[in-house]
Image (cartoon, rainbow, N blue to C red):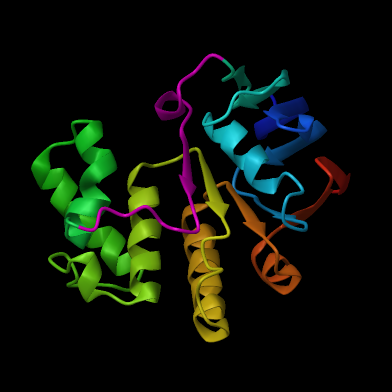
Amino acid sequence: MSENILEVKNLHVSFKTYAGISHAVRGVDFSLRKGETLAIVGESGCGKTTLLKCIAGLLEQESGDIRIQGASVMDQQPKERGTVIVFQDLRLFPHMTAEKNIAFPMELRKVPKKEQKERVEALLRAVQLPGFEKRRMKEMSGGQMQRVALARALAAEPRVLLLDEPFSGLDEGLRTEMARLVRKLHEAWKITTILVTHDKAEALRMSDRIALMEDGQILQY
């Protein structure tokens, strides 16, 4: 059995635009072993986020294959793939407390309430926010909300964690702090992760491997 947890094979994604057909991802191939972190770097519009959304099942590909733990996920819905994506805008529920936000993926899986509570407390400790269960999003700083979003993603127990420039709205100090935290969690829990970033220094700090994208293609891996 392959040791690769994720395999992307000859992936093509196109969009119809007013100017014609835009080829957003063109023949992308790569694989990722269990517990590795891959950083995808490149300029805006090169296809990084499109690639992440395809892996998560949020966009349809024109052709190619995506395999997770050896099985194709082409016909699976996003919730069935075992992938979780954290976007730059975080997409937290503003009317919910930190506890409710983090517990949301466990609610969907019908996890017992007692187990949810214990898991939320453990995750808040892991992201260095112990005691923040009852805080609402408007009562939290940008860095604290980043941590809640990360805890919510981990609560879903993903096979592959996808991070789409989640730290880009933070100042340099907070970015570095969050990068250290993600790396620490990764080393402790061995979560297979793909990070999309513009920041080459961030990519070098956080990843085991780096893919350089340009014009929908991976130029170097």
Identify which residue is drawn at 61% across, 41% down.
52
Looking at the image, which residue is at 61% across and 32% down?
54
Q: Residue 7, located in which quarter of the rendered image?
A: top right
> Which residue ends up furthest to the right in the rendered image?
219
Part of the protein shown in magenta = 75-94
Furthest residue toward top: 75
Outermost residue on the front side: it is 18
Give the answer, above or below, for where 208 lies relative to 32: below
Quarter-wise, where is residue 201 in the image? bottom right
Q: Residue at x 72, y 30 (%)?
A: 8
* Along the line of sight, the residue nearer the viewer: 48 or 123: 48
- Magenta residues, dominant SS class: loop
Up-down: is 176 above or below 182?
below
User: Where residue 75 sits in the image (x, y, percent)?
Assistant: 54, 14
**Camera sees residue 119:** no
Q: Quadrant of the N terminus?
A: top right
Q: Is residue 54 left or right of residue 200?
A: left
